[in-house]
Amino acid sequence: MSLKERLAIWTGWRAAPPHETRDEAQLLISVELLRLLAQQSRRMPYPVGLSAFFMALMAALPTRSAWPVLWMLAVLGTLLLRRHVLGRLPQLDHYPVSQRMRWAVMLSLLNGLVFSMVLVFSAAISDYERMVQTILLLGLCAGAVASTAGYLPVFMAFSGPVTLANGLAWLTGGAGAHATVWQDAVMGGLILLFGFMLRNLARDNYRVFCDSVLIRQQQVKSNQQLRAALKQTEQAMQAKTRFLASASHDLRQPMHTLTLFGSALLRRRLDEDSLGVVRNMNLAIDALSGQMDALLDISKLDAEVVPVHPKVFNLGHWLGRLQQEFLPSAQRKRLELTLICPMNAYVETDALLLERVVRNLIDNAIKYTQAGQISIVAERRGELWQVSVRDTGCGIAEEEQQKVFDEFYQIGNKERDRAKGLGLGLSIVSRLVDLLDLHLQLESTPGVGSCFTLGIEAAEQGPDSQLDETGDARSLRGLKVLVVDDEELVRQAMCTLLAELGCQARCAGTTREAVLLCMQQAPDLLLIDYRLRGSDDGLSAVRSLRNLVPALPALLISGDTAPQRLRDAQAAGLELLHKPVRADQLMTAMQRVLTGVSHVPRSAREAEDVRGTPA
């Protein structure tokens, strides 16, 4: 294959005009060749100079002439000239590459002519010395294949004169020193044949050189494209995270307001019809809130702010509670929900996070099973307890089994039925399984059903570590609460709910207003939004208010689920509630903060928030 064909193949890899791209490729090869010649020019003077010295010494001893010495000095001068000029050629960008290549050819020709002059002395040396001289010259020609990358103009400029003069010296009987015999003729012919073979070898070597240059260049371009694609992917992921955080915040604000007003209405005396409307409204808000919580769970897990607290607990009692909780949902679809688990089954892991995993698996099984049964089975396998959730649902095709763990991916829900969630349940399961270092296996057959199996580290029997349970909030009547939020509707809704709870609530929209109210009357508790107007924010506001009222209990409330916000709140040591906040959730959190409990098991409650509602 010719160089033009190879360039044509390479140009086919790129979307550019053919002639322009071929010229570009040829220019690239020439530049790389100049770099190679410059590199070799710094290395070759030493072995070549020693060879020249040895050949000059062989000619000088029998003749006692100064000509061999002068020839050796000419060789050394040529080598130094090539080293100086070739070493600078790659940096001479103000000269065209073609002109610099011509200079390299001319220097190579000068080097070849000077070396071929050594054969003038062949008449004065013995046949043995002539043979050594020939071997050295042919060795230099062979070495030129590599030192010139086989580029024929440069290679032949040196090898041509040397090979031709060497062959003619044998054919003419040592430049006329004696009559030519058949051995001399054969030797001369072999030298010329060897020179021809070296030419073909050089040509093949140059093809390999061109291929390697073009392949390296293509790899560089591919790496650049991959880095650009990776950067775009990272930017897209960051944009997605920002979008989810912004969308979550903007949607949670009105939902939070509705939740507060709805909770306040439930605490008023209403007739049965009005009470039913309020209850249905709150159910709809709770359903939407559960879906928003799934987005929050993704943000928390991606932010790596969910700690793991392993505990030993009885697996049978724990699964039995989950079975009873999901039994009504299964019965409404006329599904049988069974549990098989030995009472001596003990495991060691984070029970709160594991509960979220199993909840999502059971919830998914109920959603995608229309008839039959769902079985929860726990079996001992070596050092692990394997908990399987099996169903007789629609099943998952093999090509879909990895996709179901992707965010927002759902099978058979093209219409995006809200009853089937957002498609985040198994994505959260995948993240939690990695966090807990569990083993998750999926086996499924379309039309038969699916089986999700968790491998949990077994533990020795011991006292159960019960989950932290917080009872009903104590009476909050008479509690002085300062509410800081930049949205007036949220402030009104929060103050309305706090009034229904018997609290004395005052509201502020900025840190400055809150400081003024705090100077008039010190509050017992601070409820503050994370994001306020402009550069104002809840964390700095808490610091300012605590300068006036040291150790002021505070609760952060936010609709922002960005990972960095979660890290900042955790680093500040403040409990963070996410909008929309239910009345019972708010009352419980207020009690924790007032009693100082929140500063101790804060990390455990972070995990409890992740447990949430199945997605």
Image (tube, rainbow, N blue to C red):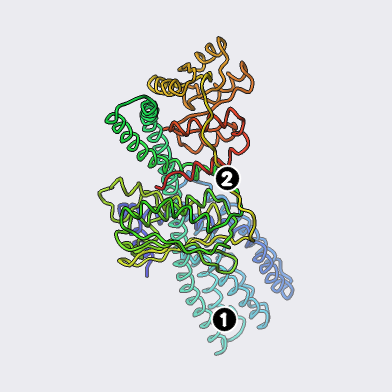
Along the polypeptide, which appears first: circle 2 or circle 1? 1
Which of the labelled discs sits on residue 112, or is there none?
none
Q: Amino acid at mark 2?
A: Pro
Q: Residues within 10 Å of mark 1 (few under 14, many from 20)?
A: many
Could you tell me residue 449's position as x and y percent? 35, 65
Quadrant that contains the N terminus: bottom left
What residue did someone put label 2 on?
307
> Alpha-carbon distance for marks 2 and 1?
88 Å
- Horizontal relation, residue 350 to residue 360: left or right: right
The location of residue 58, given as percent across then percent down, is 71, 74
Residue, x 55% and y 37% (percent of image)? 567
User: How many tags in the picture?
Assistant: 2
Camera-near label (2 vs 1) is 2
Q: Position of residue 348 (x, y in %)?
A: 60, 56
Residue 170 tag number: 1
Q: Is residue 136 above or below residue 566?
A: below
What secondary structure is found at the residue carrying circle 1? helix
